Image: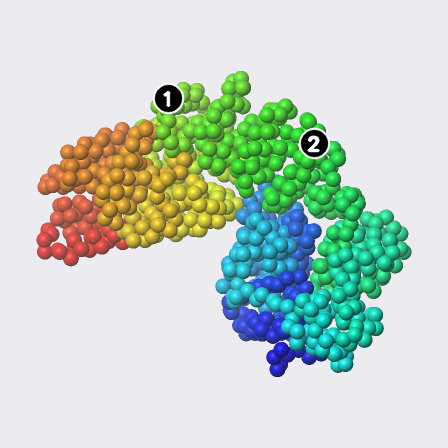
Amino acid sequence: MTEEGPTAATPAPLWEREAELAAVKGAVETLTADRSSAGSLLVIRGEAGLGKTALLAETRKIAEARNCQVWSARGGENLRSVPFHVVRQLLQPGLVSLHPEEAREYLGDWYDIAGPALGITDPGERRPDPQGVCDGLVAAVRRLARREWPLVLLIDDAHWADQETLRWLAAFAERLDDLSVLVVVARRPGDVRGESARHLDAVSAAASRPVASLSALTPDATASLTRATLGPHADAAFCREVWAVTAGNPYETVELLAKVQDSEMDPVESSASELRALNRSARGGGLVARLEGLGIEATRFAWAAAILGAGITVDQVARLATMSPEDAARCADLLRNARILTVPDPAATPGDEGDLEFVHPLIATAVYNSIPPALCTAMHGIAARVVTDSGRGAAAASRHLLEVHPDDDADLVDQLREAAREHLAVGAPDAARRCLERALREPPRPDVHPHVLYELGCAALLTSPATTIGHLRNALAMPGLDGPERVDAVFRLSQALVHNNQMDEAVRTVEAEAARHESGPARLRLQAVQFMWEGIHSGEGTTPERSERLVEVARTCTGRDNSERALLILRGFDAMVRGENAEEVVELCDRALVNGRLAPGLGWTDPEWGIELLMMLANSYAFIDRLDRAEALYTEALRAYESAGWSGGHLALAHAYVGVGHRRRGRLREAEKSLRESLRLAERVGRGLPLYWSATCNLVDTLLARGHVEGAWEVAEQYGFAPPYPSTIVLPDPRSVRGRLLLAIGRTKDGINELEAAEKAATARGHHNPVLVPWAVDLARALATEDPARAARLAADVRRYAERFGTDTAIGEALRCAAALETGQRAVRLAAQAVTFLDASPCQYEHAAARIEYGIAARSTAELNRGLTLARMCGADGLVAKAQEQLAAGAALE
């Protein structure tokens, strides 16, 4: 105890909590001092009964004394399966104060994304992206926090919060630096696993100061508390036994001392031996025995309250416990008097629909665990009907349905499927998965079983591709999944296989299913999907045969439906990567559009085809010098995903290819910005995925173009831009980009080896587009001194492929390469020709480089200045330095 320790009036759980209270007071002082002060996060950790809730209650008093708005929420042991339960509870005061029109205006674009999760608006028709919902909640709380300053958010029992809330809390905690709000989180150590544990660890890592770990009361504090409660005559031996029996746990100490008062025990040494038995009656089995002593009706009432868990009303408990309102009211009084139930504090739980709550979570847990198992499952079934009858929907009832014993109940399966649909509609796929997994255990009827498996596979696609594979395979193996639903199941199975890096299996799956169908729309769609996966597969295969088959299938396609349009896109993309005539590629891609736009059902957020197909279309335009069309598609994708709240892998890929558009144009600063944002988003999705490679590869390529070689190498090292490469192709070719990087940092031999590996892979795949797979240009320059004959052959091959492809960029780059290998007037003529072609190209960086190289070859100050101007516009610092260096030696120039 310190000299400034607690007084007799101090609540027991706050004894010896001076350091924690000082931290709270300091945080509140900082918050209220200035609206522009940085946000802060305090985490309080301690075992049950050590006073976390009391510290939060004291935090509320301290904050409200400084005129802060205080919003609070609490996790519940039996409520963890209810998505967004805690965050809804937390934000209820702010949401209630807003009229619907005001909420829509205030939350802006996030209203339709976060609104369903918060329960303030109905879900839309399109299934939301869970990461987008999380980001929407972060944005919503940030806006509310600015509106309500100074705002304090209190979250108790965070270890029992639902996973969706914890995901939001972890994301929100990372963005407190520029937001003036205080967040205080209380949790137990342990008691949580998996994703929830990871989110809680992230919250602790973001705390403004070290996590406060509460310890038990010391013997001296326990003695002082005992005398403050029972009187100064409590002797030392009695006080020591109180500490020994309770281990200094504040909650148990308070309960034990209350029992001592109730029993009128004299607090002296001769009575100390009775404390241990008295303490057992205050918790665990002793608490249950005490509850049973109140009578069977009171026990049944307490059981029903424990089943409900939150929002406990006497009326609902009466219906669940099948007792009259009068008997229920009498039982409620008995349980309040016995310190088992209490009336909720309206300040701590504003807007709580309940009349009652348990005095402490330890009591709630003990009561719930005392319910006989068979009776417990039966009561959950009744509770589900009570919730459903109240009009709160299948999702609200699902936490009870999950606990019901399997009994071949078709109605229960239907309810769980409906609950899963409601969970998916608000962006909670994990909650949907739990409902569908439980439905399988019922089990469903044979005609329903494959449909439940199909729905489960769709629900788990984004979060667990490996699990999805098993569910969809089982669904397809059963009779009953037919027609368009079966075709869609095969497509989703192939998607899951691709995401799980099983590309060969994905191809075989759709190929086998296509063979089962007669000619028609279903077969055509499956053929298109097969060609799509084959088209993005980076492994060596029978590429010529595949391309010939694709040519044959697409030959009769006119674009009359989306399957034909998909085949035209795939044929165009294949022709582009193989370096066929660019005008033919344009013609194929244009035929896949309707009046120059994507056809209905083929949009960026439409689920039938996925993002891969449309990115193939956009990239085909990007690498055949039709950048206006490519950039329009990239930008359309970005806007579509942002407006739909899709902030996971789809948005990451959209940012990456917006960056590609900028890079192709020569807007290198803008490209770097977009690609860094893509990489930030990709980090949240997970390393090693194709979208992660797209962001990293293009960022390295852009930094090299800017002349930021050290920065490019740092990115490559930090993000693992090195072999082994992904099983899907990345544009531009990552081997070529890494080879260029190795040459740039002086590792010439390694760079040559990497470029030769790129040559082998491109040859095996038949990829001869010299802009998309530029290994030959860099390899020719690298070999110019040690093997000039091979370098000349490579340059000649590049020019031949470029002229076959026919774009100004490809031909200009080939001429730049040829000029670099020559000297004298031949070098000047080739450099001049390169400038002519690249002047007509939309790729300004390459144009700038050609101008500077021509200026050097022709010893022309005018050309160097033109190139310098272009390089500055592009943000190509390396080219700028090169031109300036040549201009500084002006005496040697014309």
Percent position of residue 10, x then y: 69, 76
Element type at marker 2? loop
Q: Position of residue 701 (x, y in %)?
A: 32, 45
Residue holding disc 1? 545
Q: Residue at x 64, y 68 (%)?
A: 216
Depth check, front residue: 888 or 820 = 820
Q: Residues within 10 Å of mark 1 (few under 14, many from 20)?
A: few
**Residue, x 45% and y 47% (percent of image)?**
682
Q: Residue at x 28, y 34 (%)?
A: 759
Residue 409 location, quadrant:
top right
Q: Which is nearer the N-term, disc 2 or disc 1?
A: 2
Amino acid type indicated by mark 2:
Pro
Q: Is residue 831 visible?
A: no
Quarter that holds the N terminus: bottom right
x and y percent of residue 800 in the render?
23, 30
Residue 457 lies, with reference to residue 151, above or below; the image says above
- In the image, 594 versus 801, the foreground residue is 801
Query: Which residue is identified by label 2?
Result: 444
The residue lying toward the viewer, choosing from 414 and 676, is: 414
Looking at the image, do the residues carrying marks 2 and 1 touch, with CB atoms under 8 Å apart?
no
